[in-house]
Amino acid sequence: MFSNMRKNAPWKVDGPLLWGYFFDGQDRKKLEQLAAELNGKGYGTVGINAQQDKLVLHVEKVETHTPASLDDRDQEFYAVAERYGVFYDGMDVGPAVAPAK
């Protein structure tokens, strides 16, 4: 992922980026409780939206990651998702600020 971003992304990969994380579930209350926990850790809630037959919680935070630290974050989120009875569905990434025009 990182080598592909270094090659193709129009932003600096090794600095702060806006990382979005996604959790799927059927129970809005569980997703809201998870969002509250993550808000307490500095993640902002983008929303909980219905997609097909599930609800998707999207949170985001500006962070700097290496491949190892991103793997650690993923493992942390798999565990917290299991605790809440939801599914961690991965992440996306973009520039921390909008690119200049």
Image (spheres, rainbow, N blue to C red):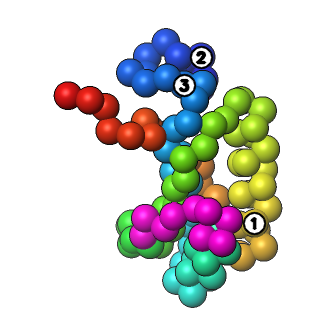
In this figure, which residue is indicated by the disc labeled 3? Answer: 13
Contact (Cβ within 8 Å) of mark 1 with mark 3: no
The residue under label 3 is which amino acid type? Val
Distance in Å between CA atoms under marks 1 and 3: 26 Å
Q: Position of residue 39 (x, y in %)?
A: 60, 70
Q: Position of residue 44 (x, y in %)?
A: 51, 64
In this figure, which residue is indicated by the disc labeled 2? Answer: 3
Q: Residue furthest bottom?
A: 29
Q: Nearer the viewer, mark 3 or mark 2?
A: 3
Q: Nearer the viewer, mark 1 or mark 3?
A: 3
SS label for mark 3: loop
The residue under label 1 is which amino acid type? Val
The residue under label 2 is which amino acid type? Ser
Give the position of the N terminus as an image quadrant: top right
Mark 1 vs 3, N-terminal side: 3
Mark 3 vs 2, N-terminal side: 2
Q: Position of residue 82 (x, y in %)?
A: 76, 68
State the image quarter where residue 69 is shown: top right
Mark 2 vs 1, N-terminal side: 2
Q: Residues within 10 Å of mark 1 (few under 14, many from 20)?
A: some
Q: Start and end of the magenta stretch? A: 39-47
State the image quarter where residue 83 is shown: bottom right
Q: Residue furthest top?
A: 7
- Picture disc at residue 33: none
In this figure, which residue is indicated by the disc labeled 1? Answer: 80
Closer to the camera in the image, 73 or 54: 73
